[in-house]
Image (cartoon, rainbow, N blue to C red):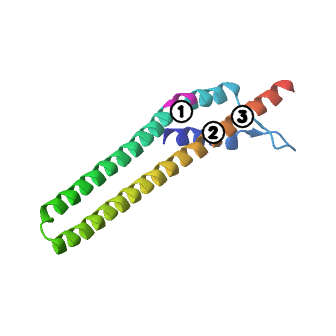
Amino acid sequence: MELLNVLNDLEELVEEATKIPMTNKVVIDADDLLDYVDRIRSVLPEEIKQAKWIVNEHQKIIDDAEIEAKRIVEEGQNQVSKIAEETEVVKQAQAHAEDIINQAKQVANEIRNGANEYADDLLESLQKTLEKTLGEVARGRDELSSTKKK
């Protein structure tokens, strides 16, 4: 991810900056820091596009699972109507159709749950990255602000 690369570069800039003796402060050129802020701003829209794509793919997976479940249910119902000539055969067909329907529902639920977990994991990761980025930007601004006051 490009955002992580920019953040790593920013972190390296802070780590390699000139340290102020007897403090936990460093001196960073304002133009350098602002360049990193601009790079982060330019990368964030792409990260947000990726998150939207993930959400859309999540919905597509759910929709596909529901379509497949409906197809399986219809297939089961068709099998039941074809076999419905004799009582015993009808009972067996109904039991089989119910099994197919239950399996289809179970598969659809598993796919839906898996898609939800996958999307949630990706969105959680993106959220953490964005929160970390915002925290680093805020700390950088605070340091710049305290440097200006001195």
Query: Dot 3 corresponds to which residue?
Result: 138
| x and y, in percent, of residue 62 in the image | 38, 48
Locate the C terminus by quadrant: top right
Q: Amino acid at mark 3?
A: Ala
Query: Dot 2 corresponds to which residue?
Result: 133
Tell me the distance, in whole angstroms, between the alpha carbons under discs 2 and 3.
Answer: 9 Å
* Main secondary-structure element of the magenta-colored stretch: helix
Query: Dot 1 corresponds to which residue?
Result: 44
| x and y, in percent, of residue 143 in the image | 77, 33
Q: Quadrant of residue 102?
A: bottom left
Q: Residue at x 29, y 65 (%)?
A: 98
Q: Judging from the image, what secondary structure is the residue with disc 2 in?
A: helix
- CB of mark 2 within 8 Å of CB of mark 3? no
Magenta residues, start to end: 41-45
As drawn, 23 above or below 142: below
- CB of mark 3 within 8 Å of CB of mark 1? no
Q: Residue at x 36, y 48 (%)?
A: 61
Pick out the residue farthest to the bottom.
88
Tell me the distance, in whole angstroms, between the alpha carbons under discs 3 and 1.
Answer: 16 Å
